[in-house]
């Protein structure tokens, strides 16, 4: 090693100790420097680094795959060098790094990197001593618009997806120390309120003094919708009420509040069960700002008259679909409220990143809003990052849109109840009700039920549709929450059964070192150290399935380790004869990494299950 280190120069000064947590990022810097040194003409070449999946293999842990591409480029320029020679030259120019044990050239021109055990030991030791600190990234002020169901309407599985994905994105970004605003863009201001208020007036004329029994808001909605469709006179009154409401008439406002409160309580129950934190800022919040955004757009001559409406083209070429900013009756639309909202977010909230977690069906709408916001000067692509975090639909086991047996949309509270039932049954089938205390059993039941629903959603690439199946979610093999939660509790039980106190790993580390001699210990350690890279990968594209895949990889690496490495040795009578402190520390590091991942994914681990 020393020989290799000697022929290299020292590390570039901007690579501080913090960056060594981000292995990918660190290697990119190393190889970018090496390429620039070896081939100055090609110094701008984007570095290609891949993690080698088969960790035990002879091809190292990471690979730089630039030599082939460089050879091709040079050939085009009339220089003929073999990829292997280029790889060798890149290797020679690599600055020394504490992360790297050795570098080898292999095959057609791969540069294989072997990580340093010493570095891994010190990184794991720090993790155990100080806890898992997030990688250092520039801090942003971010608004996440998620969940966002509509008052008086059913909160459906699409909203469930938005709620689960949105919550995890917030947790991920908060872990990275960003300043995150969690916003529920409730649909609380649509034209549906006209008919709801008119119907309330007829059914419960005394609603001002006596709170009306409209707990079943869905039924109430259906009744009023039917009258709206059948009765011309009622329809007219409904429209008048939209006007009185938006004008702030106290009686209409009171009726609107009563209706909103009923929905709000229902939504809150779901949020409490799923441990979701969100601040309500519905469309109504933007009423005055809708008036001013219309003025703003008019003053910039961006509104065009079209058949009584006022529309805005998102771009000068007038491609795509124009936004309807003012309807022919003078009212505002979903487009208007989103233009007012984006302006408020950028100009008043001063955020530099907005994330909309909404189903893929609305991508045209959001593209138009983002383009229009740029066109009128609200958003500036150099200063503001704006993402539509899209997701696919939830399918039933028949592969069709998720519905109840009778064909109705699935009520979210029923779905969560069903999850609770299934998870209890599974725990009973395993005889856990005989072993756990009632409190432990109920904690495990909740952890499994809500954990499996969230995880089933998060573990797929969000863009694709996914099939909702309790049976699959509760499978204890494969990439499921159940498998992860069981593995986690198994890890916790190891230190517990050692007869020693591992609750303060720092103390143990004063007396014992982490040793990574066994192939499986080493593999587990390297897997754990990928955590920081994975966090960056998840946050850059806002994809959480990478984190789920990582958890699964950690659990499989742990299982392999545990199958071949004794942590505690017992004699025939069951008496403990040897405790391997290093290995139990490795178990504790695994548990710590998993706990951090679970926190982001919204899983509540339990020590006993
Ligand atoms: N309430 C809308 C719906 O249920 C989602 C709102 C999403 N957020 C937004 N800013 N448009 O479809």
Image (spheres, grey):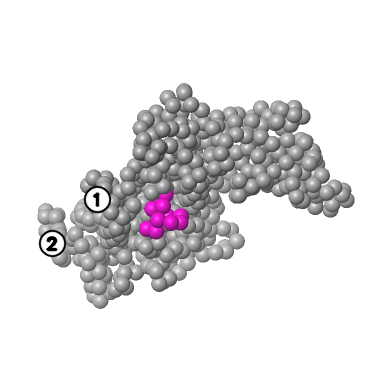
Q: Is residue 6 left or right of residue 455?
A: right
Gap between marks 2 and 1 measured at Cα: 56 Å
Q: Is residue 164 magenta?
A: no
Tag 1 secondary structure:
helix
Q: Residue drawn at (25%, 69%), measured in percent from left and top?
A: 222
In the image, 367 versus 372, the foreground residue is 367
Q: Which residues are magenta?
A: 473-484
Q: Which residue is mark 1?
A: 434
Query: Is residue 372 visible in the rendered structure shown here?
Result: no
Pinpoint residue 230: horizontal percent, then vertical percent: 25, 76
In the image, 392 versus 52, the foreground residue is 52
Q: Which residue is mark 2?
A: 205
Q: Residue furthest front?
A: 572
Pinpoint residue 270: horizontal percent, then vertical percent: 29, 53
Q: Residue drawn at (18%, 60%), measured in percent from left and top?
A: 214
- Establish whether ligand 1 lies closer than 8 Å to the Cβ of label 2: no
Q: Is residue 134 left or right of residue 74?
A: left
Pinpoint residue 219: horizontal percent, then vertical percent: 22, 67
Tag 2 secondary structure:
loop
Pinpoint residue 115: horizontal percent, then vertical percent: 63, 37
């Amino acid at each position: 090693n020393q020989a290799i280190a000697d022929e290299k120069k020292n590390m570039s000064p901007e690579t501080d100790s913090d960056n060594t947590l981000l292995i990918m990022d660190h290697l990119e810097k190393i190889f970018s420097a090496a390429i620039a040194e070896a081939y100055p003409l090609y110094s701008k070449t984007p570095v290609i680094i891949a993690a080698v999946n088969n960790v035990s293999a002879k091809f190292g842990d990471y690979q730089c795959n630039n030599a082939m591409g460089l050879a091709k480029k040079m050939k085009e320029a009339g220089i003929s060098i073999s990829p292997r020679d280029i790889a060798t030259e890149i290797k020679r120019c690599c600055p020394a790094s504490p992360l790297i044990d050795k570098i080898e050239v292999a095959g057609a021109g791969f540069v294989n990197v072997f990580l340093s055990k010493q570095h891994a030991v010190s990184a794991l030791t720090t993790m155990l001593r100080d806890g898992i600190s997030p990688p250092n990234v520039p801090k942003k002020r971010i608004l996440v618009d998620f969940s966002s169901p509509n008052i008086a309407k059913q909160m459906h599985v699409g909203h469930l997806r938005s709620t689960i994905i949105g919550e995890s994105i917030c947790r991920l970004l908060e872990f990275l120390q960003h300043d995150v605003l969690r916003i529920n863009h409730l649909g609380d201001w649509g034209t549906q309120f006209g008919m709801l208020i008119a119907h309330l007036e007829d059914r419960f004329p005394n609603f001002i003094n006596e709170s009306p029994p409209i707990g079943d808001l869905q039924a109430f909605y259906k009744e009023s919708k039917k009258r709206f469709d059948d009765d011309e006179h009622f329809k007219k009154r409904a429209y008048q009420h939209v006007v009185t409401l938006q004008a702030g008439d106290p009686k209409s406002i009171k009726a609107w509040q009563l209706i909103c409160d009923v929905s709000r309580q229902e939504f809150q129950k779901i949020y409490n069960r799923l441990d979701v934190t969100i601040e309500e800022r519905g469309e109504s919040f933007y009423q005055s700002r809708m008036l001013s955004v219309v003025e703003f757009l008019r003053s910039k001559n961006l509104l065009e008259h079209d058949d009584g409406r006022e529309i805005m083209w998102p771009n000068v070429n007038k491609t795509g679909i124009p936004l309807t900013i003012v309807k022919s009756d003078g009212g505002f639309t979903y487009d208007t409220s989103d233009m007012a909202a984006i302006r408020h977010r950028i100009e008043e909230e001063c955020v530099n990143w907005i994330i909309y977690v909404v189903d893929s069906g609305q991508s045209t709408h959001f593209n138009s809003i983002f383009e229009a916001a740029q066109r009128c000067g609200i958003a500036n692509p150099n200063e503001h990052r704006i993402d539509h975090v899209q997701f696919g639909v939830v399918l039933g086991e028949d592969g069709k849109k998720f519905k109840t047996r009778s064909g109705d949309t699935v009520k979210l509270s029923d779905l969560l109840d069903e999850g609770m039932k299934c998870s209890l049954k599974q725990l009973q089938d395993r005889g856990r009700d005989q072993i756990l205390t009632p409190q432990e059993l109920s904690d495990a039941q909740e952890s499994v039920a809500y954990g499996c629903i969230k995880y089933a959603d998060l573990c797929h690439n969000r863009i694709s549709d996914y099939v909702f199946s309790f049976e699959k979610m509760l499978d204890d093999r494969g990439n499921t929450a159940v498998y992860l939660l069981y593995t986690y509790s198994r890890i916790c039980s190891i230190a517990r059964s050692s007869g020693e106190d591992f609750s303060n790993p720092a103390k143990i580390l004063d007396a014992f070192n982490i040793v990574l001699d066994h192939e499986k210990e080493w593999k587990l350690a390297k897997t754990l150290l990928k955590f920081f890279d994975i966090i960056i990968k998840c946050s850059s594209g806002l994809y959480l399935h990478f984190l789920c895949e990582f958890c699964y990889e950690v659990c499989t690496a742990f299982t392999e380790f545990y199958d071949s490495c004794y942590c505690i040795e017992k004699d025939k009578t069951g008496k403990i004869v040897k405790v391997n402190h290093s290995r139990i520390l490795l178990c504790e590091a695994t548990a710590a990494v998993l706990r951090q991942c679970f926190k982001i994914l919204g899983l509540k681990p339990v020590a006993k299950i």
